[in-house]
Amino acid sequence: MAGHSKWKQIKRAKAKNDAQRGAIISKHVRAIQVAVREGGPAPDANVNLRNALLAARADNVPGENLQRAIDRATGGADDRPIEAVAYEGYGPGGVAMLVQALTDNRQRTVSEVRHAFDRHGGSLGTAGSVAWQFDRRGIILAADASEATQELAIELGALDFQVTDEGKLEIQTDPVELDRAVKALESRGIAVDSAEIGMIPQNVVAVPEGRAGQLLRLLEALEELDDVQDVYSNLDFATVQIAS
């Protein structure tokens, strides 16, 4: 899971200015609103909302923004249909990429995604061209990476886990087991910083020679699009600093 963890750390390190913070908050607000509309406003009864809130809090989204998003979705103040869409493509050097978005205008979103790929040396592919290289997984970031927590992760049936550069424990679960695993950790007094459903590459590839900067610019350009929620790749980010 090194690639997934490393990119999350890179993203958060770059999110420092007000514009970047505003974009991050907007993405979380949209995810929360979609979760509420699909499953209701009660986190205990809506796993998707619970996970969206955890992800938002991990990015330090203010509580008032979270509650306002729930209230807005519950009250139906914005009735524009928002749907989940996914795009697949290749970055420079053939790095596989998955882009997940929430949009009220498919034509706008695909145009923006295609432009980002074209501008930064990538190419937008067809449905199914890349997705087969990824597995859908529950991903938990626990604040405690002690041996006891690792043993608990094994007891809970974790598919994989690793200690991150920040000294936290990133645990990979079957998606249907994500909520149960989070509750089990919290019941043992282990703080959960985030929990989400994500796409994990089956295999990672080293950064192609001389392409590190171009790849990161493409990833950043995709992440900065208002409609884009997540970008996944099979790039091994542990090799980026060495090559760049």
Image (cartoon, grey):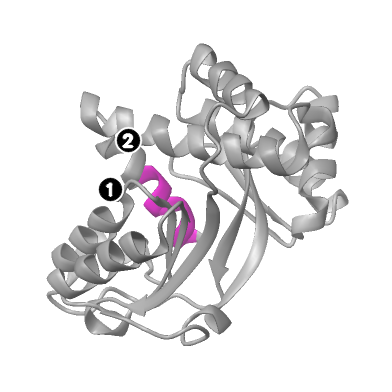
Provide the major secondary structure of the magenta segment: helix
Where is residue 215 drawn, in percent x and y?
A: 22, 67
Does the residue at mark 2 contact the one at mark 1 (Cβ under 8 Å)?
A: yes
Camera-side residue of 196 and 227:
227
* SS label for mark 2: helix
User: Label 2: which residue?
Assistant: 23
The image quadrant that residue 138 belongs to is: bottom right
Q: How many marks?
A: 2
Label 2: how many residues lie within 10 Å, few (<14), some (14-19) or many (20+)?
A: some
Where is residue 230 drawn, in percent x and y?
A: 45, 54
* Residue in the picture at 82% in, 52% down: 177
Magenta-tinted stretch: 2-9
Q: Work out whether 111 lies above or below 126.
A: above
Residue 146 appears left or right of 127: right
User: Label 1: which residue?
Assistant: 224
* SS label for mark 1: loop
Camera-side residue of 26 and 155:
26
Label 1: how many residues lie within 10 Å, few (<14), some (14-19) or many (20+)?
A: some
Q: Work out whether 34 lies above or below 192.
A: below
* Residue in the picture at 12% in, 75% down: 210
Does any portion of residue 164 appear in the rendered image? yes
* Residue in the picture at 51% in, 63% down: 85
Identify the amino acid type marked 2. Answer: Ala
Name which of mark 2 and mark 1 comes first in the sequence: 2
Identify the amino acid type marked 1. Answer: Glu
Residue 6 appears left or right of 93: right
**Residue at the farthest top position:** 64
Tell me the CA gap for discs 2 and 1: 7 Å
- Asked whether 244 falls inside the magenta stretch, the response is no
Where is residue 234 drawn, in percent x and y?
A: 43, 72
